[in-house]
């Protein structure tokens, strides 16, 4: 099994790396780990290689840097062949308000990382995956979206917009990849316990631990689900959210708690 994961230094991406390592230990498994914090990637590489007898290749990079992803994809493919699964889990979430001029950079960064970052991640792998499929291997692209992309959440305009864009982008990609027999899976998580949600002060319904979530994500990937919301209870919430007319949505969402703003310069 060959897997390439962005956002592997933390949270869901890290939990997915553990899950693949556990499931495919002692099986000639290669996991590519990409994120910006190289020290986290190195520590994860050491643990996974020592505990599960697999091989990890680490790629410290920013998903906004398309050239860095081309270089990582080339390196991974040349050394190990095309991955069976590429997972775009890198993402950021911050409270934003359009009325605040100082939030403009956060809007740009969130859209760049959460949407263009997916494109940058998948593009350099597609050709080698297409050729691998012709040789009889399996190939799958997986994007981590969010239930926050189903409807616009107040105080999270950038995040909601980025995840709505990710959902639509992944659907376009899924249909495009039919010609190449490359499967595309969109996972829309509800609340998962990670550093991203640790800063939330409000109640998070159906909050799920990252290791349990990763187990369910990998099951869904294995089944080649096209679109899945995890946990399933949030799937019903998402279905309901889609049905609510705009006037009622406004009344329900008006007093919803706002995502905390991240204290960073968005460089
Ligand atoms: N946790 C939830 O409840 C939840 C719910 C729905 C969707 N999601 C989505 O799940 C994904 C993972 O989130 P998480 O909860 O695991 O959050 P997290 O623990 O904060 O992890 C985010 C990961 O993305 C990486 N990342 C962020 N910006 C990056 C960049 N510019 N380039 C490369 N890597 C970058 C981070 O690594 P570095 O900082 O080292 O670069 C980190 O590994 C995100 O797309 C998020 O939107 C999460």
Image (spheres, helix red, strand yellow):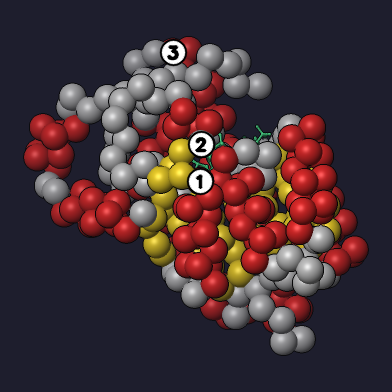
Q: Secondary structure at mark 2?
A: loop
Label 2 CB-ligand 1 distance < 8 A: yes
Q: Residues within 10 Å of mark 3 (few under 14, many from 20)?
A: few
Give the Cα distance between marks 1 and 2.
7 Å
On the image, the x and y values in percent for residue 213 come to 47, 52
Residue at mark 3: 101
Q: Is mark 1 within 8 Å of ligand 1?
A: yes
Across and down, in percent, residue 264 comes to 58, 16
Quadrant hosting residue 177: bottom right
49 and 205: which is toward the camera: 49
In the rendered structure, which disc, 3 or 2, sits on the residue that comes first in sequence? 3
Which residue is the site of mark 1? 210
Badge 1 density bin: few <14, some 14–19, many ≥20, Cα 10 Å: many
Q: Does residue 4 appear in the picture of this structure?
A: yes
The answer to whether 143 is drawn above or below residue 80 in the figure is: above
Q: Earlier in the sequence, mark 1 or mark 2?
A: 2
The image quarter in which residue 191 lies: top left
Nearer the camera: disc 3 or disc 2: 2
């Amino acid at each position: 099994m060959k897997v390439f994961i962005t956002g592997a230094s933390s949270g869901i991406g890290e939990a997915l790396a553990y899950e693949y390592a556990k499931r495919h230990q002692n099986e000639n498994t290669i996991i590519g780990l990409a994120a910006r914090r190289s020290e986290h990637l190195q520590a994860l590489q050491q643990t996974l290689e020592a505990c599960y007898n697999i091989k990890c290749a680490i790629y410290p990079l920013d998903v906004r840097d398309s050239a860095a992803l081309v270089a990582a994809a080339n390196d991974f493919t040349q050394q190990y062949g095309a991955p069976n699964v590429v997972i775009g889990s890198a993402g950021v979430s911050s409270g934003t308000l359009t009325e605040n001029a100082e939030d403009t950079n956060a809007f740009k960064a969130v859209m760049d990382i959460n949407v263009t970052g997916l494109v940058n991640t998948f593009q350099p792998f597609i050709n080698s995956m297409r050729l691998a499929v012709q040789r009889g291997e399996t190939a799958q692209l997986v994007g981590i979206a969010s239930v926050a992309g189903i409807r616009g959440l107040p105080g999270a305009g950038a995040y909601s917009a980025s995840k709505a864009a990710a959902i639509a982008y992944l659907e376009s990609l899924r249909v495009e990849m039919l010609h190449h027999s490359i499967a595309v899976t969109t996972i829309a998580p509800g609340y998962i316990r990670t550093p991203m949600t640790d800063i939330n002060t409000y109640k998070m319904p159906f909050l799920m631990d990252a290791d349990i979530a990763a187990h369910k994500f990998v099951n869904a990937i294995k089944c080649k689900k096209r679109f899945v919301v995890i946990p399933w209870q949030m799937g019903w919430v998402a279905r309901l959210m889609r049905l609510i007319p705009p006037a009622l949505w406004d009344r329900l969402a008006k007093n919803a708690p706002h995502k905390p703003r991240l204290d960073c310069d968005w460089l």
